[in-house]
Amino acid sequence: MCAFRRAMEPGSAVSARQLTAVSGGPVAIPDDERLIHLQFRRFAGCPVCNLHLRSVVRRHDEIEAAGVREVVVFHSSAEELAEHTSALPFAVIADPGKRLYVEFGVESARRSLLDPRVWGPIVGAVALSAWGILRGRERGPAARPHGGRFGLPADFLIGRDGRVLAAKYGEHAYDQWSVDELLDLASGSPSRPGPARSDAARSSAPGSTGSADISNS
């Protein structure tokens, strides 16, 4: 297990920075117009990550209407992620060196796959992924993914002032906020912004792309 620490909790300050999305656009954190939902996933093509992101894609309009911008981090290279996430409607960040994972205290542990609570989602996710691969709509993950297979997810809701409003460190690979939980947290945020322009409406919005290749279609 990596030597991480749980570095972020409600009230923690996230230093301002500008990341680069896989699409090439800049991603400012914090965002002075919207809340940021910063979620840490595992590796490119990860079936359980894709299973969760399907739900985010389906309800992305609701998330944007709540004044939240999605930013998703993977510990794979930008080149590898581009093959899997080029059509996602939100910013994807490549962090193969896990610098952000260390900063935010996001861990790797064998329980990510050994916890019995994740076995059901894994079966469903692998079945969906296999069907997508057979239809030519998805690419399978690398046999030995960069950064390993034991990453744990994490979620952070970051206010416009750079303060962490809420945080969740997953106990297994499919332990993350649901979209409903995210929307509830955003609605109760004291710094919730007004309705934001959609990324689609911002033709030059950094890190924005189309609809996902991991959708159920």
Image: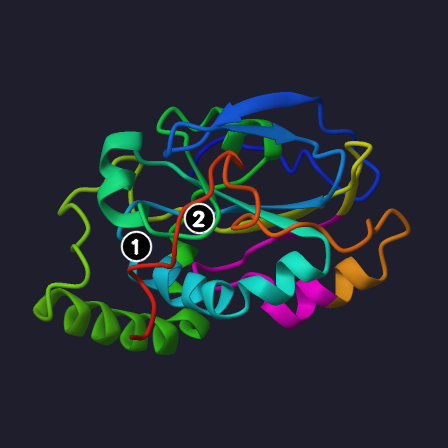
Vertical order, 160 against 183 (above or below) = above
Secondary structure at numbered mark 1? loop
**116 within the magenta span:** no
61 or 174, which is in the foreground? 61
Q: Which residue carries the number 1 mark? A: 46
73 or 116, which is in the foreground? 73
Is the C terminus in the top left, top right, bottom left or bottom right quadrant? bottom left
The type of residue carrying mark 2 is Arg
Vertical order, 120 against 5 (above or below) = below
Q: Splitting the image into 4 quarters, where does residue 64 fall?
A: bottom right
140 or 35, which is in the foreground? 35
**x, y (%) of residue 113?**
36, 60
**x, y (%) of residue 79?**
24, 31
Q: Residue at x 23, y 37 (%)?
A: 80
Tell me how far mark 1 sits from mark 2, CA to CA: 8 Å
**x, y (%) of residue 120?**
36, 78
Is residue 178 shown left or right of residue 145?
right
**Label 1 vs 2, first from the N-terminus:** 2
The type of residue carrying mark 1 is Cys
Cβ–Cβ below 8 Å for labels 1 and 2? yes
Q: Start and end of the magenta stretch?
A: 166-183
Q: Which residue carries the number 2 mark? A: 41
The number of numbered badges drawn on the structure is 2
Is the N terminus in the top left, top right, bottom left or bottom right quadrant? top left
Point out which mark residue 139 bears: none
How dense is the environment of label 2, judged by Cα within 10 Å: few (below 14), some, or many (20 and up)? many
Residue placed farthest to the right in the image? 190
Secondary structure at numbered mark 2? loop
**177 within the magenta span:** yes
